[in-house]
Image (cartoon, rainbow, N blue to C red):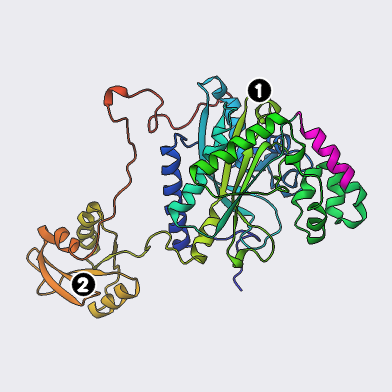
């Protein structure tokens, strides 16, 4: 066994997985941009109270799942366990509530929770998310759900189910809690120890219990949808009718709640339905809802909000389980070989124009015999070898060998990019900055000019 291993519940993303995550990130963020949700990045370390205040002291996150951080005597910090509270903190701190409403933001970030590890549940995991601040209408709720359904269709995930519910707004939730406390108190002795505790702390979470005995009792409990105010019912009806009109399949799940205290009205989850992922309960590939009181709870002005977050790890492995291709081939398509010894700079010089043209190119560093170099190129998954230093490949010529078809051609150096392009495809290079279509529309602070906000404490 190796001396050092990744911490329990965390793992390394090896090249194939990392490439898959990169591809999913490109799809998610491009889709978010098309919906008008620019990206925000928050620190991986936050004030611990950000999450306690947002999620509630009785939540799993606040009570036992956060990774506490201390440095140089400075405590009270934690690794970020979820995205909404951190984005809300940034929304308030930087005065984004003063910007024209609604304010739409997206993110793609690693999260950390000291949770019990199980299938598709890790202690370091990645999430994408959308947050919309300043719109009380039901349409942003509908939009983030439609965004997610469309995203899963875009990447090819088919084995999933959308479930929705409402938990009422702040005015109605006391009535719901009172009814649930009365019901579950009458069945206290039949509930798990965890659900017995939740009767006193957050009785809505009893509906969310994973214990089969609790679930059987919860099915007979009063339903939040039957207890919410008429205004909440109209809000929820607008969403379900909107889903019908948009052709998004869903099911109303009367016991659906979310594990964080800040949710009001709409809650939704996308559950995986592949039998591989349903043996131990429901696994959500995305979940979210409305949080109309969160900004005010965290010290900002009264501002409605709604959002959704998706698990990248869950999405990746669900796609793999369905047999979908995710990511790209991580092997270099082209290998530079040479029959000469000690000509490393020449090999790199030969690779340069090919790389600049968009080909993925690896260089053989050794002075091994050419047949051994060719064998190594094949083992590394290369499709083309460009060979220099042989009697045929002199005087401004190289050999371009197709390692799949096992055919080769002597080519002028000036034509090597064209010849390699006959055998493998170029890959587009990312751009550091993409400005507005019309240069006259350029404004200070746009992407690529000032990526970080100034911290007044510095």
SS at mark 1 in the image = loop
Asked whether 316 or 156 is in front, the reply is: 156
Asked whether 168 or 306 is in front, the reply is: 168
Residue 164 got which mark? none
**Can you give x and y, in whole percent of width and height, for residue 248 in the image?**
52, 47
Q: Is residue 7 left or right of residue 170?
A: left
Asked whether 267 or 121 is in front, the reply is: 267
**Can you give x and y, in whole percent of width and height, for residue 202 in the image?**
80, 42
**Can you give x and y, in whole percent of width and height, for residue 94 in the image?**
56, 25
Tell whether position 176 is magenta. Answer: yes
Tell whether position 404 is magenta. Answer: no
Q: Quadrant of residue 191?
A: bottom right
Q: Quadrant of residue 282?
A: bottom right
Q: Which residues are magenta?
A: 171-183
Q: For the image shown, how many numbered marks are present on the structure?
A: 2
**Can you give x and y, in whole percent of width and height, for residue 15 in the image?**
44, 62
Question: In the picture, which quadrant includes the C terminus?
Answer: top right
SS at mark 2 in the image = strand
Dot placed on the residue nearer the N-terminal end, 1 or 2: 1
Residue 117: tell me if it is visible: yes
Please name which of the two marks, 1 or 2, marks the residue nearer to the observer.
1
Label 1, label 2: how far apart the Cα atoms are: 65 Å
Question: In the picture, which quadrant includes the N terminus?
Answer: bottom right
Residue 379 sits above or below residue 272 on the image: below
Residue 302 got which mark? 1
Residue 223 sits above or below residue 450 on the image: below
The residue most toward the left is 395
Q: Badge 2 is on which residue?
A: 402
The chief SS type of the magenta part is: helix
Seen at 74% across and 50% down, the residue is 208
Residue 145: tell me if it is visible: no
Seen at 17% across and 58% down, the residue is 417
């Amino acid at each position: 066994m190796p001396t050092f291993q990744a911490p329990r519940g965390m793992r390394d993303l090896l090249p194939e997985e990392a490439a898959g995550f990169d591809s999913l990130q490109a799809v998610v963020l491009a889709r978010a941009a098309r919906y008008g949700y620019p990206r925000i990045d928050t620190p991986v370390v936050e004030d611990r109270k950000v999450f306690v205040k947002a999620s509630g002291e009785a939540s799993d996150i606040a009570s036992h799942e956060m990774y506490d951080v201390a440095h140089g005597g400075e405590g009270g910090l934690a690794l970020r366990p979820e995205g909404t509270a951190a984005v809300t903190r940034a929304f308030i701190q930087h005065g984004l509530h003063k910007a024209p409403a609604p304010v739409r933001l997206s993110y793609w970030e690693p999260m950390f929770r000291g949770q019990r590890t199980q299938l598709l549940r890790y202690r370091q995991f990645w999430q994408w998310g959308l947050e919309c601040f300043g719109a009380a209408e039901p349409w942003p709720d509908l939009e983030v759900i439609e965004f997610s359904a469309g995203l899963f269709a875009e990447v090819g995930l088919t084995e999933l189910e959308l479930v929705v519910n409402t938990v009422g707004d702040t005015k109605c939730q006391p009535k719901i809690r009172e009814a649930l406390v009365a019901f579950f108190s009458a069945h206290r002795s039949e509930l798990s120890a965890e659900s017995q505790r939740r009767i006193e702390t957050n009785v809505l979470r009893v509906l969310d219990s994973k214990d089969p005995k609790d679930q059987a009792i919860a099915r007979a409990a009063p339903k939040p949808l039957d207890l919410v105010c008429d205004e909440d019912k109209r809000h929820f009806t607008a969403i379900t009718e909107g889903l019908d009109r948009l052709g998004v399949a869903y099911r109303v799940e009367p016991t659906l709640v979310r594990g964080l205290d800040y949710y009001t009205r709409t809650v939704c989850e996308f559950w995986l339905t592949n039998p591989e992922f349903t043996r131990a309960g429901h696994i959500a590939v995305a979940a979210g809802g409305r949080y109309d009181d969160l900004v005010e709870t965290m010290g900002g002005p009264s501002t409605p909000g709604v959002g959704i977050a998706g698990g990248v790890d869950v999405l990746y492995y669900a796609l793999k389980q369905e047999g979908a291709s995710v990511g790209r081939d991580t092997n270099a398509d082209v290998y530079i070989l040479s029959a000469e010894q000690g000509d490393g700079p020449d090999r790199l010089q030969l690779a340069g124009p090919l790389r600049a043209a968009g080909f993925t190119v690896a260089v053989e560093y050794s002075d091994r015999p050419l047949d051994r170099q060719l064998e190594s190129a094949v083992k590394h998954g290369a499709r083309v070898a460009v060979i220099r230093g042989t009697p045929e490949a002199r005087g401004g010529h190289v050999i371009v060998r197709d390692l799949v078809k096992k055919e080769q051609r002597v080519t002028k150096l000036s034509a090597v990019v064209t010849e390699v392009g006959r055998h493998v495809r170029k890959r587009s290079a990312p751009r550091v900055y993409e400005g507005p279509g019309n240069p006259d529309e350029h404004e200070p602070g746009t992407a690529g000019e000032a990526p970080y906000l100034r911290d007044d404490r510095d």
